[in-house]
Image (cartoon, grey):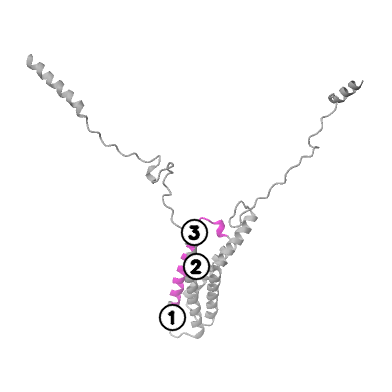
Amino acid sequence: MADKGKKGKDAAPAAPPPGAKPPDKKDEKVEEKPPEKKVEPKDEVGTRKGCRRYKWELKDSNKEFWSMGHAVVKILSLGCLIGSLIMFTGSIVHPLLTLIITMEISIFSFLFVIYTFAINRYLPFVLWPIADILNDLFACIFLGGAVAFAVQTRQSIPMNYLIALILIALAGFFALIDVCLQRKHFKGKKVKRHVLVPPTKEGAKGPGQGPGAAKPKEEPKPADKKAEKPKEADKGKDKGKGGKK
């Protein structure tokens, strides 16, 4: 009887009735690991998208714009040009001077907005450092010419007119300083050479040693003298036969 009891305990459990539904696997609790958060680099955009990317671009653009001194120089130039317009209000001024001053104010304010709101980061097809250098150079030329033209067209220069001319000259000087500051963008950058050369095999040193390189022309081999001797011997035999005939 004891053996039968043990056998009953060791026996497999009975199969469920045909009408019963199998237990759902959803009810079973599965331990899932929480997804790991990606650590984004601080010095690069990384995989940021949307608002996160714009926030990073805004901070990085303003940090570069203010730390390198471009913002301060542009604000000083704008202040000098606006002050010159204010000083010109009490005297008769040639319309060409006001045209040059308003043009430079609009260009400086446009660039200030572009860099402040990081719009330049979304327009990579424009070379912004070069565009800024060209604008500063043209600003120096136009403002210097405006000062010279204003001095030549006036016989008497009142005090407010003189202060306006000094402010215009200072705006051109600050634009020249901005040209010097733009040079920092080009330091440490070298021109890439052999960009269009196809990749070479391992161990090849020069650009002409790759798989697509032209093979050197083979020099023609000198004719063998041994091959010419039997021909001369055959000619001698033919001559001998001809003489016997």
- Magenta region, residue range: 119-147
What residue is rendered at 45% in x and 77% in y? 147
- Measured in 3D between alpha carbons, the distance from the residue under mark 2 to the one under mark 1, in whole angstroms, is 30 Å
Question: The residue tagged with tag 3: helix, strand or loop?
Answer: loop
- Taking 71 as reference, is 193 above or below it? above
- Measured in 3D between alpha carbons, the distance from the residue under mark 3 to the one under mark 1, in whole angstroms, is 37 Å
The answer to whether any part of residue 95 appears in the image is no
Label 2 sits on residue:
181
* Sequence-first tag of 3 and 1: 3
Residue 168 horizontal/vertical position (percent): 49, 76
C-beta proximity under 8 Å, tags 2 and 1: no
What residue is rendered at 59% in x and 64% in y? 63
In which quadrant will I find the N terminus? top right
The answer to whether any part of residue 5 appears in the image is yes
Residue 159 horizontal/vertical position (percent): 50, 85
- Compare residues 167 and 45 and report the one nearer the observer: 45
